[in-house]
Amino acid sequence: MKAFLALVLCVPASAAQETYARPADGTVLRVGPGDGFAGVLEVGADSVLRLGEVRGAYRQVFVAEGFPIYLHEDYVEVDETQARVAVAGDRVNARALPTTVGNDPVGHVGSEHDDLVLLGREGRWVRVVAPEDLPLHVPQDALLTTDVAAGEVLWERALEVRAARRAWMLAAFQANDPTWRQETAWREEVAWLGRQPLATAPEAELAQRRERLRRIGADTSWAPTRDTVEAALAALDHQLEQRAATSAPVALLPATPPEPSAQAALPDPREREARFLGLGLLFQGRGVAIQRTGTVVQEAVGPDAALYVLQTYDGARYKLTAPINRPRLADLVGKRVELVGRELELASVSGPVLVVDRIVWQER
């Protein structure tokens, strides 16, 4: 079938202006011009397609909203911090599945595609939203022609939907991806350490900062985080070199435990946890349903931050958050309560988290 179709003469569409069409409801868009090619996307009668070249009984079409494709990681550059992908080549195969076996390319992308939306990874394949200039194929008899002006309006609206969906996907990625949250927390900590004074800091504290920065630099897998760490380390090393030039050599590791005042200057990781759990709407609808009874306590972890913790009667501790009406957690402090919600394990919070959905009863 494919060999036969390869002989079909390709007739270009009119170059005078863009033309558009609506597909019949339930139309399947395929990798190539024939039923033997894999289907990629099913569209409804409310969609609009931009028309391309005629290929026998089929026609090339373009989808404004895009569709998922796979690119091999050897030919792309991924910006994990912004969930974006840039193509590092001129004719990189875009595929509907993460394999080269029995999987014809959808088409090709090149270095001009430098802002594709990252959807995820599967092995050594990167999943992205296809650009709007990557064609699919549809039977010509499944297309319902539409007025050019009306088609242009519908196409522009579809592009706006694409942009809005992109923003939503990025926000969802940042809210739900544990690696993104962990890397963000690390960069916030590095920035906090960078704002602390160097010239007047005790040597033991500088040594602690260097050790913490080195640990973050060793644990991170993201280049932007590593760059931030290296800049902070360079500033710290410069300060140590200046001290060494004007006084006795600085001991990088303290011979004795640091003074309490030096320890107090370092950030309390629970303060970051408290701020993160304060974004209760992030956790709506997530987790495993549980019901627990115990006493709520409040732990002050900063000048304007507090953790709310449920201590159960069997010795368990749950850090609390609530997707709706968070202030009520403060009203539970010191009371015996029974809570219904969902249990979560989060990379940026130590210990289990209980997302409070409902208070069954509370001590008066």
Image: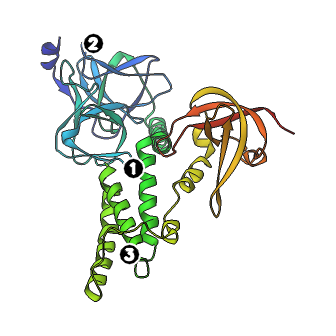
Residue that carries the numbered disc 1 in the rendered image:
82
Residue 342 vs residue 151, the one in the foreground: 342
Count residues near mark 2 (Cα–Cα under 10 Å), then give few for <14, some for 14-19, many for 20+. some
Residue that carries the numbered disc 3 in the rendered image:
203
Count residues near mark 1 (Cα–Cα under 10 Å), then give few for <14, some for 14-19, many for 20+. some
Mark 3 to mark 2: distance in Å?
Answer: 72 Å
Residue 308: percent from left, percent from top: 67, 47
The disc label shown at residue 185, or none: none
Q: Is residue 60 above or below residue 309?
A: above
- Which quarter of the picture shows residue 87? top left
Q: Amino acid at mark 1?
A: Gln
Image quadrant where one finds the N terminus: top left
Q: Amino acid at mark 2?
A: Asp
Mark 3 to mark 1: distance in Å?
Answer: 37 Å
Mark 2 to mark 1: distance in Å?
Answer: 38 Å
Image quadrant where one finds the C terminus: top right
Name the residue at 52% across, 68% down. Answer: 260
Q: Is residue 248 above or below residue 150?
A: below
Q: In terms of secondary structure, where does tag 3 sit?
A: helix
Residue 6: percent from left, percent from top: 14, 19
Q: In terms of secondary structure, where does tag 1 sit?
A: loop
Residue 119 vs residue 253, the one in the foreground: 253
Residue that carries the numbered disc 2 in the rendered image:
35
Name the residue at 73% across, 45% down. Answer: 329
Q: In terms of secondary structure, where does tag 2 sit?
A: loop
Residue 139: percent from left, percent from top: 32, 17
